[in-house]
Every structure is written in structure tokens, then in C-alpha cells.
């Protein structure tokens, strides 16, 4: 008999699930194997520590809460319950189709195209030559102050 | 007296009196299972209500393939598993009835005894919470509720061999977690 199988027997024995022959085999093994015997003792001691907590009476007002919930949430009619798994995915599919296929060209038509004036303004904004008039090293000084946390 | 199965058939036809009868039969058992699973009284109340409402609304789904009790316990353990998945680990409250029942202990030992008991319960609950959901379910059903491997297999819809494996692993894990406390005399 190997120890691996015996460890499983130990677990089942602690749950009262071993038959007579298995129990006999386990007892014989425990007599000759000190490791398994130690495992058995440790496990039984741990399991006895976590015996069930004492039964506690359920709160007396429990059914009141359930009855209240029963009256507020009325049962769904059978047909709705049956159709729900069909309707919900169909609704999501319709929404998805609308947002991608149908609304795509619509949005394109509604959104105004940028005209030439806008492009010219953008170019002006991005042109770094606007900083040419700034005093020399003034921007780099500000940057350095910000990074070092110092003030001039 | 009507059987559970006859009553649940009536519940499916919206007989609230039949539901009340079933509730009375199982209220204490289910409440204690939930309390032992989550380890906190107020959470147990909330989950218990949820379980009975689920059984009421899904009464028409009961096919009689298993006993009513097995079906109800299955709803209960699944609700507990889902609840624990969403929630933070349990904090055992001093207001829990099991703890506050210690108030009847001798006056001189009162605070010390309560604290020691609270600490012991918190250690054990933490160890049980560290198990995987299936290991924990199998362990609670076996150790706390006294179900056999066959019954646990039916409730959890797994094989008997799988129940044995789950309980073996659960015990090894609990040994790893709790043995150091035991050796230090803290349990």
C-alpha cells in the first residue's frame, strides 16, 4: 500500500466514508508509517478544532421581508420569460447595426468638412516662428524652473 | 402531511401558502448553512432571503429529478458562492449572536473570553475562506451540515470521486493554514 493512497483514505476516514476493508488497511498502514500517522494526527486535531458552530435561530422577521419582496416583484408572465433570451440579444444586435452600418454615413453627412480657412489657421497655430519674438532663453528658463521647482 | 415535492408543485401554481409551509420546514437549516458559509449574521439574513425568493420564482423549473431538499441546497450553495465572489472577506462582528451569547459567561472572564473566541473564529473563517469556492462548499456541506459524499455530489452536480478530491485538498489546505496556530496554542 502506498502513502499517497493512504492520505486519501485518511481524509475519507475523517469524513466517515471508509468501508471496513479500507479502514483495516489504513490502520495497518498507520502502524508502520510514522509520516502518515503524523498526518492523521495533525488532520484530526485541525478538523476537531473546526467543528460546526452552534446552530443559531433564524431572525423571526425573515419571512416578512420575503413576503414584501414577493408582493413588490410580481412574477413575470410566462411568455415574457420565454421570449427574454431571444429579445435581449436581438435588441443589442439591432443597436450595434444601427451604430455601425446606418449611423456611419449619417454622421459623415452631418459633420461639416474642414474648409480651407480652417487649414490655414491650423498651419499658423503650429508654426513655431510665432515664438521668434520672445526674449532669448525666456522659455527654457521657465521650463527649468518648473522642473526643478525653483523660482527666480 | 404533504411532501416537499407536492408543495413545490403548488408553489409553481402560485400557491403562497404552500411556499410558506416549505419556508417553515427549511428556514432554520438554510439559515444555518448560509451563516456557517459566510460567517456573518447580517450577511446570512440577506442571502437567506435571496435564496427563498429564488426558489419561489424558479419553482416552475423544479423537474423532480432530485429531491426538493437537494434542489434547494443547490440554490443555497450557488447563491453563497456568488455572494462571496462579489464581497470582501468576512469580518466577524462582536454583535453576532454566537459571539454575544458569551455575555452570559462569568463576569471576570467576559471580555477576555469574548475576544479569544472572536479571534479563534476569525482565524478559522479566514482559513475556510482561503479555500477555492468548490472546496469550501464541499467542506461546509460535509463538516458543518453532515452530508455524505453521495449527497454532496448531488447538490454540487459533480461525481463522488470529485467530492473526495475536493475534501482531501480542502483538508490539506486547512492543515497548512491552521497547524501553525495550533502548534502555538492559539487554537
Image (cartoon, coloured by chain):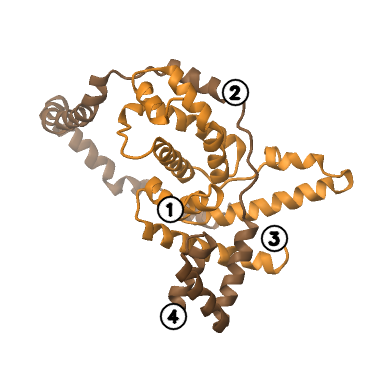
Quarter of the C terminus of chain B within the rendering:
bottom right
User: Dividing the picture into quarters, in which one does residue B56 lie?
Assistant: top left
Judge depth for marks 4 and 3 and give the one in front.
4
Instruction: Find residue B187 and name its label.
Output: 3
Q: CA distance from mark 2 to mark 1?
A: 31 Å
Q: CA distance from mark 1 to mark 4?
A: 27 Å
Up the image or down, B165 lies above or below B47; here it is: below
Determine the secondary structure under disc 1.
helix
Q: Position of residue A105 (x, y in %)?
A: 10, 29
Do we see residue A90 in this rendering? yes
Determine the secondary structure under disc 2.
loop
User: Dividing the picture into quarters, in which one does residue B178 lie?
Assistant: bottom right
Residue at the limit of the structure toward the right, as seen here: B108
Mark 3 and mark 4 in contact (Cβ < 8 Å)? no
Residue plotted at (23% across, 25% down): A82
| Same chain letter for marks 4 and 3 | no
**In terms of depth relative to the viewer, which is nearer, B66 or A110?**
B66
Q: Chain of mark 2?
A: A
Determine the secondary structure under disc 4.
loop
Q: CA distance from mark 4 to mark 3?
A: 32 Å
Residue position for label 2: A61
Residue plotted at (72% across, 62% down): B186
Residue position for label 4: A2
Do we see residue A150 in this rendering? no
Q: Chain of mark 1?
A: B
The answer to which of marks 4 and 2 sits earlier in the sequence is 4
Judge depth for marks 1 and 4 and give the one in front.
4
Amino acid at each position: 500500500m502506498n502513502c499517497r493512497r493512504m492520505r486519501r483514505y485518511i481524509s475519507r476516514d475523517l469524513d466517515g466514508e471508509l468501508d471496513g476493508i479500507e479502514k483495516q488497511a489504513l490502520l495497518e498502514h498507520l502502524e508502520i508509517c510514522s509520516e502518515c500517522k503524523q498526518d492523521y494526527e495533525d488532520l484530526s486535531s485541525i478538523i476537531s478544532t473546526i467543528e460546526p458552530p452552534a446552530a443559531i435561530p433564524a431572525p423571526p422577521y425573515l419571512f416578512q421581508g420575503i413576503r414584501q419582496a414577493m408582493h413588490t416583484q410580481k412574477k413575470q408572465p410566462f411568455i415574457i420569460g420565454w421570449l427574454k433570451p431571444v429579445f435581449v440579444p436581438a435588441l443589442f444586435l439591432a443597436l450595434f447595426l444601427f451604430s455601425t452600418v446606418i449611423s456611419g454615413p449619417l454622421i459623415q453627412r452631418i459633420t461639416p468638412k474642414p474648409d480651407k480657412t480652417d487649414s490655414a489657421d491650423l498651419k499658423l497655430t503650429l508654426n513655431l516662428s510665432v515664438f521668434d519674438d520672445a526674449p532669448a532663453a525666456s522659455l527654457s528658463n521657465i521650463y527649468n524652473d518648473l522642473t526643478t521647482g525653483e523660482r527666480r | 402531511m404533504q411532501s416537499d415535492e407536492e408543495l413545490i408543485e403548488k408553489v409553481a401554481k402560485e400557491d403562497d401558502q404552500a411556499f410558506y409551509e416549505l419556508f417553515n420546514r427549511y428556514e432554520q437549516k438554510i439559515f444555518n448553512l448560509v451563516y456557517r458559509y459566510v460567517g456573518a449574521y447580517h450577511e446570512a439574513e440577506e442571502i437567506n432571503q435571496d435564496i427563498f425568493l429564488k426558489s419561489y420564482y424558479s419553482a416552475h423549473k423544479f423537474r423532480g429529478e432530485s429531491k426538493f431538499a437537494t434542489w434547494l441546497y443547490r440554490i443555497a450553495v450557488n447563491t453563497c458562492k456568488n455572494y462571496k465572489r462579489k464581497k470582501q472577506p468576512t469580518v466577524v462582528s462582536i454583535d453576532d449572536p454566537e459571539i454575544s451569547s458569551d455575555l452570559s459567561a462569568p463576569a471576570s472572564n467576559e471580555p477576555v473570553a469574548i475576544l479569544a473566541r472572536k479571534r479563534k473564529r476569525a482565524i478559522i473563517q479566514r482559513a475556510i475562506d482561503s479555500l477555492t469556492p468548490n472546496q469550501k462548499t464541499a467542506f461546509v456541506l460535509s463538516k458543518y451540515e453532515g452530508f455524505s459524499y453521495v449527497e454532496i455530489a448531488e447538490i454540487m452536480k459533480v461525481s463522488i470521486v470529485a467530492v473526495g478530491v475536493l475534501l482531501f485538498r480542502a483538508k490539506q489546505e486547512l492543515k497548512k493554514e491552521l497547524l501553525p496556530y495550533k502548534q502555538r496554542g492559539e487554537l
